[in-house]
Image: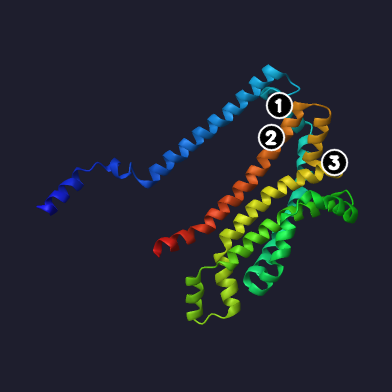
Amino acid sequence: MKGRGTGDRTKATPPGSLGFSGPPGQNRTRQRRKIWVVQGLIALSLILGMQLLNMVAGNLVMPTPLSVLRQAIDMWADGTMGWALWESLAVLGAGFGLAATSGVFSGILLGGIPFLGRVFAPFVTAMNSTPGAAFIPLIIVWFGLYTEAKIVLVWHAAFFPILISTAAGISTANRDLTEMAQSFGAGRRVLFWQVMVPDALPSILSGLRIGAAVSTVGTVIAELTMAQSGLGGLMIAAGNRFQMDRYFAVVVVLMALGTLISLGLRQAERRFARWRVVMAEAR
């Protein structure tokens, strides 16, 4: 009787009460659509807020979205925005490339060799906790005001987040994988490069994503504090002339640039993190 009652209750239970409203693919699609709708509403509210603030305070405080769009079209048409974007991308790409290479390599060493990690940990913490602006005068004295100094500043901004994330990922490698590899006779070098480093890829990519975002900020700071060029130079020139529509046109490009870089690295991070999820579910 108890078994029959249990079966009756199971049959009578509606699917929605268990939290399943349909196939997983449909649920993910619905959730994605909801997110897009909410994001669209937020963007629309920001545009309306700009228009309302313009009506209340005037163009000097906030330009209208239409004037920002017109100014952006003009700057792209005459090549001003394209050339500035190219200059910023050159500094950003070189600085971030150097930071990614040196940060990942240093993080692998500090995370894979515990003695080195313990020796350099206080120095890394001290450098990472010091505001980057404190090094700007020193960078200017050593490298001048032009491209080399800007690249160094971007490198300094992105290096430590990448190093710390990489070292953390290497030092916390999956013990099950390392023990399994050792049981099959894997040597220290094979264990390090073929087990620990691949296992740390999600952490490395997370550090690269953070470093890319910081590099974008560092590029603008470098272009503001040193020889004015690129998008940062356009932004400060427009701000000094109180051309707020031109100013916000540059800000929108900077926001789009940072978002695209972060999204690209996030997709790579998700792709390399899938096998970790599969292993966790298998355990």
Q: Residue furthest top?
A: 55
Quadrant for the C terminus, please.
Answer: bottom left
Measured Cα–Cα span from mark 1 to mark 2: 9 Å
Q: Could you say where residue 36 lies in the image, as x and y percent from the top left?
A: 51, 36
Measured Cα–Cα span from mark 1 to mark 3: 22 Å
* Mark 1 and mark 2 residues within 8 Å of each other at the beta carbon: yes
N-term mark: 1 or 3: 1
Mark 2 highlights which residue? Answer: 252
Mark 3 highlights which residue? Answer: 228
Residue at the image point whose x is 85% and y is 45% from the top: 226
N-term mark: 1 or 2: 1
Q: Could you say where residue 170 lies in the image, as x and y percent from the top left?
A: 59, 67
**In terms of secondary structure, where does tag 3 sit?**
loop
Q: Could you say where residue 17 lies in the image, as x and y percent from the top left?
A: 28, 41
Marker disc for residue 68: 1
Measured Cα–Cα span from mark 2 to mark 3: 19 Å
Taking the image as shown, residue 200 lies to the left or right of residue 5, namely right
Say if 125 sits above or below 78 in the image. below
Rate crowding at label 2 as few (under 14), some (14 to 19) or many (20 or more) other CA atoms within 10 Å: few
